[in-house]
Amino acid sequence: MRPLARLALLACLVMPSLASAVDAPPLPPPAGVETPAVEPTKGDDGIYHQKWFVSSFLDLREDFAEARVQGKRFAVIFEQRGCSYCVKMHTDVLSKRYINDYVRENFAVVQLDMWGEREVTDFDGEKLREKALAEKWGVLFTPTVVFYKENIDDLKGQWGQPLEVARMNLGIGPGTFYDMFTWVRSKVYEKDRNFQRFHLERYALREKLEKEKAAAKDKVN
């Protein structure tokens, strides 16, 4: 292969990854201000809700498209009545101001009831009840958050794993919860699919900040 042709081929291979890196939003601080606390609302279905959760006709293709127009990533969360982990997610995690603000500003989140009867249109066009969709997607626990790829234009007519980046379920603490949303939003997974490595790095940063804060407080006292 001639040198110029080789350079052109190399550019084609490198430029997409560079463009992706440029497009990725910068990482937010590892922690932030927790107050004033954000209070969720409890619906007649016995499930807690955030005021900014997506309210729509539950056509997931349309909801995804709207999220892209808004410059947000798309996620679907399954919950159920009587789920203690779901309650804690709202009252112990999303109650923290910096976490709530970050998710609200960067994600369009559709909340579904694992046993619900509302009709949902899946990405492949199939219309089915919430509880049937949960079974179709293999949702076994609540809460389960399903994170979607930034672009699914080449995956029209498909559903499930090919469209997903990752899933997060059961009882997740504030740090892990925040880090997962950050990992998806900043597209860290494109460089490293190992979320735990990223989470441990962020955890170490939070520990360092806490020690520095405690040291500064001791000096004042």
Image: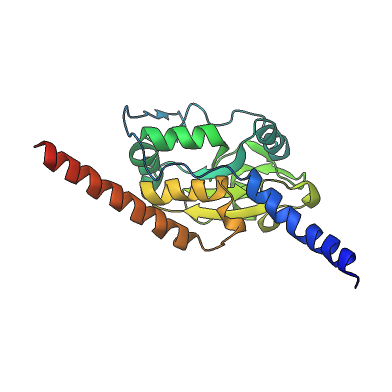
Residue under the image location 19 percent in, 41 percent down: 216
* Residue 61: quarter of image: top right
- Quadrant including the N terminus: bottom right
Where 93 sits versus 187, above or below?
above
Residue, far bottom = 1
Residue, far front = 3
**Residue 83 horizontal/vertical position (percent):** 40, 46
Specify how the rendered protein is coloured.
rainbow
Q: Is residue 157 visible?
A: no
Where 126 sits versus 190, above or below?
above
Residue under the image location 58 percent in, 31 percent down: 54
Residue 105 horizontal side relative to residue 57, left or right: left
- Quadrant including the C terminus: top left
Q: Is residue 146 visible?
A: yes
Question: How many numbered discs sit on the rendered protein?
Answer: 0
Q: Nearer the viewer, residue 185 or 67?
A: 185
**Residue 56 horizontal/vertical position (percent):** 64, 29
Where 111 sits versus 139, above or below?
above
**Residue 166 horizontal/vertical position (percent):** 57, 55
**Residue 51 horizontal/vertical position (percent):** 48, 26
Q: Nearer the viewer, residue 25 or 127?
A: 25
Q: Nearer the viewer, residue 180 or 192?
A: 192
